[in-house]
């Protein structure tokens, strides 16, 4: 039986004070429910938020991780550094990284491998743009994004990883994939794993991301292959985030 997981992605929002307040408010509203919960906070607030969540149910994550182990890579943060802050998760391949910062499939695979090597669970984001969906390329895009990681890290690496299906057209737009649209892609992704390792496929957490709100979370999370969500905008409000978490 897969455990549900709800992850907040705070992106480049807030201040030190607001990050501490948001994490404190989330902690205050947690009720010991069985689902997993985490927040991926800006690097510079990992220490503050990490101290608050230590020993609690709320896990800590980063929004990216360096594709190299260490060295002359100005501006990058390594998986070893994230480990110092007890990060449990690191998002890799978010569509904003792919679109605005040129993260290629190969680079995302390298980031994935670096996280895993330090015992940090990568949350691999995959998903198509609106144009790709309209041109019936959704599954092809997902295949390419997955294959790059399979080629570098192997399928079995996913026993310590999470996937987030995030249709690019649904991120931050208020447009959500319908429950059926999301389920269709989640089922496809799980099928890709089932072909290679049935037990792994059965246990793999596949999150949905893209304008999840308290009002649509329950129906999305009720789909058989949706195991929770990666939440952007709604994770910046403790009440909304907790409502979504309770829906899981
Ligand atoms: C995201 O950034 O991963 C995301 C899903 O954002 P939003 O919930 O705001 O669409």
Image (spheres, rainbow, N blue to C red):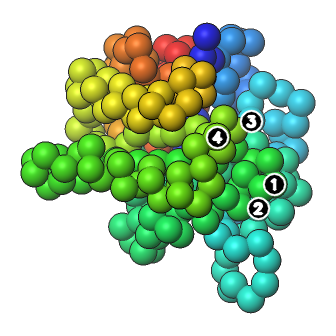
Residue visible at 42% across and 20% down in the picture: 225
* Residue denoted by label 4: 156
Closest to the camera, between mark 2 and mark 1, is: 1
Of labels 3 and 2, earlier in sequence is 3
SS for callout 4: helix
Q: Which residue is mark 1?
A: 118
Image: 113 above or below 173: below
Q: Is residue 7 above or below residue 3?
A: below
Q: Nearer the viewer, residue 167 or 235?
A: 167
Point out the tag, 4 or 2, that comes first from the N-terminus.
2
| Residue 113 is at least partly visible in this image | yes
Task: Pinpoint residue 122: horizontal percent, then vertical percent.
Answer: 63, 48
Q: Which residue is mark 2?
A: 79
Give the residue displayed 24% in from the left and 53% down from the top: 129
The label number, if any, that marks residue 59 in the structure image:
3
Q: Within the image, what quadrant is residue 195 found in?
A: top left
Q: CA distance from mark 2 to mark 1?
A: 6 Å
Upstream in sequence: badge 2 or badge 1: 2
Tally of numbered tags: 4
Q: Quadrant of residue 23?
A: top right
- How far is disc 1 from disc 4 in space, using C-alphas? 16 Å
Do callouts 2 and 1 mark residues in contact (Cβ within 8 Å)?
A: yes
Do residues under tags 4 and 2 come within 8 Å of each other at their CB atoms? no
């Amino acid at each position: 039986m897969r455990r549900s997981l709800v992850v907040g992605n705070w992106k480049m929002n807030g201040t030190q004070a607001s990050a501490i307040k948001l994490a404190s408010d989330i902690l205050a509203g947690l009720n010991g429910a069985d689902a997993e919960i985490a927040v991926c906070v800006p690097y510079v607030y990992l220490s503050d938020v990490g101290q608050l969540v230590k020993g609690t149910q709320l896990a800590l994550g980063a929004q990216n991780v360096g594709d190299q182990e260490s060295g002359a890579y100005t501006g990058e943060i390594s998986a070893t550094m994230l480990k110092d802050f007890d990060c449990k998760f690191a998002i890799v391949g978010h569509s904003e990284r792919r679109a605005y910062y040129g993260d290629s499939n190969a680079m995302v695979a390298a980031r994935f491998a670096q996280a895993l090597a330090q015992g940090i669970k990568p949350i691999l984001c995959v998903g198509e743009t609106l144009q790709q969906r309209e041109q019936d390329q959704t599954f092809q895009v997902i295949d390419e994004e997955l294959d790059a990681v399979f080629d570098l890290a192997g399928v079995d690496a996913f026993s310590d990883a999470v996937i987030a299906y995030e249709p690019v057209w649904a991120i931050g737009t208020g447009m959500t994939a319908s429950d059926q649209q999301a389920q269709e892609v989640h089922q496809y992704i799980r099928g890709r794993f089932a072909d290679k390792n049935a037990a792994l496929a059965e246990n793999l957490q596949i999150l949905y991301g893209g304008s999840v709100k308290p009002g649509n979370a329950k129906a999305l999370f009720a789909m058989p292959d949706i195991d929770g969500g990666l939440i952007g905008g709604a994770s910046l409000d403790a009440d909304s985030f907790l409502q979504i978490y309770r829906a899981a």
